[in-house]
Image (spheres, rainbow, N blue to C red):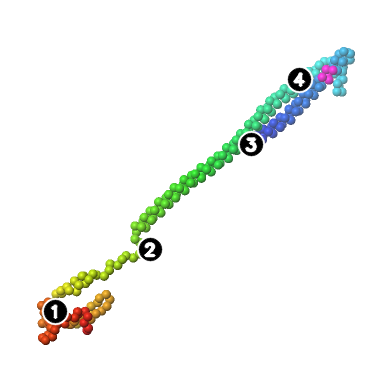
């Protein structure tokens, strides 16, 4: 539209120049026609034909022909001038309309560009919110998976703390274990050498040598010799 407006403005400029030329020619034609009319009237009154106008001699019929031509040219120039002025007026109105339309279009384009940026920002905001929601959902799922999984890094394991020890066996269990009866072994070929007892990583010698069947009573305890009291010392604390 800007190019069309410029082209119309250039054409209007040329029309203005043509209109000035047509107006000048029409005025000159009428001026010459009036000059011929004056000479014609003088010669008609005096009877002095031919007359001389602008260095040329004209008889009465020639004067009539020349004046007719000048009047026709003047009317033609004036008619052309009227058309030119009409076209020029329409072109100027069109130029004004185009100028208004160009300004309106530029304003609308600027507004559309702003609206487009706003729409793009709104879309980016919506997409960003959706992306953040997806990230939050993913992180929540990861935290739930990590919390449900006992496997973790060293720092995580240390942060959890160690489980409490179960503690030592109760005294009743120890007493029941120590006072439990053992069935005597009848294997005659069993060696008299007792293996050392391993308790929590320490080796203890056998509490006492194995007694023969005749040296123990019915409860599996050693019999005391005649005239000698039975030893009540706990076997665990006897020296080898």
Q: Is residue 188 left or right of residue 76?
A: left
Q: Does label 2 or label 1 sit earlier along the sequence?
A: 2
Query: Among all residues in the image, which is located at the extreme bottom?
Result: 227
Q: Quadrant of residue 37?
A: top right
- The reply to whether the C-beta atoms of the residues labelled 1 and 4 are less than 8 Å apart is no
| Real-space Cα separation, disc 3 to disc 2, in angstroms | 75 Å
Q: Quadrant of residue 70?
A: top right
Q: Position of residue 230 (x, y in %)?
A: 14, 82
| Real-space Cα separation, disc 1 to disc 3, in angstroms | 128 Å
Q: Nearer the viewer, residue 39 or 51?
A: 39
Residue designated by label 3: 2
Q: What kind of element bears circle 1?
A: loop
| Real-space Cα separation, disc 2 to disc 4, in angstroms | 116 Å
Q: Tell which tag, 1 or 4, sits nearer the viewer.
A: 1
Q: Is residue 210 left or right of residue 156?
A: left
Residue designated by label 4: 72
Residue at left offset 64%, top offset 30%: 94
- Please provide the residue range marked out in magenta: 34-38
What crowding class fits label 1: few (fewer than 14 Cα within 10 Å), some (14-19), or many (20 or more)?
few
Q: Is residue 88 above or below residue 165?
A: above
| Real-space Cα separation, disc 1 to disc 4, in angstroms | 168 Å
Residue designated by label 2: 159
What crowding class fits label 3: few (fewer than 14 Cα within 10 Å), some (14-19), or many (20 or more)?
few
Q: Tell which tag, 3 or 4, sits nearer the viewer.
A: 3
Q: What kind of element bears circle 2?
A: helix
Residue at left offset 43%, top offset 52%: 135
């Amino acid at each position: 539209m800007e190019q069309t407006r410029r082209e119309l403005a250039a054409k209007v400029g040329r029309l203005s120049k043509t209109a000035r030329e047509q107006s000048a020619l029409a005025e000159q034609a009428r001026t010459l026609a009036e000059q011929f009319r004056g000479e014609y009237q003088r010669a008609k009154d005096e009877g002095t034909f031919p007359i001389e106008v602008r260095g040329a001699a004209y008889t009465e019929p020639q004067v009539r022909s020349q004046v007719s031509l000048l009047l026709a040219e003047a009317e033609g120039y004036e008619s052309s001038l009227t058309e030119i002025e009409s076209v020029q007026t329409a072109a100027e109105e069109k130029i004004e309309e185009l100028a208004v339309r160009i300004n309106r279009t530029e304003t609308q384009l600027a507004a559309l560009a702003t609206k487009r940026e706003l729409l793009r920002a709104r879309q980016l905001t919506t997409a960003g919110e959706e992306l953040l929601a997806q990230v939050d959902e993913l992180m929540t799922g990861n935290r739930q998976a990590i919390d449900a999984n006992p496997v973790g890094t060293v720092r995580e394991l240390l942060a959890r703390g160690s489980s409490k020890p179960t503690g030592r066996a109760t005294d009743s269990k120890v007493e029941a274990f120590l006072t439990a009866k053992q069935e005597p072994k009848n294997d005659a070929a069993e060696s008299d050498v007792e293996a050392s007892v391993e308790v929590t990583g320490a080796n203890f010698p056998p509490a006492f040598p194995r007694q023969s069947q005749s040296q123990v009573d019915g409860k599996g305890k050693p019999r005391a010799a005649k005239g000698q009291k039975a030893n009540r010392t706990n076997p665990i604390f006897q020296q080898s």
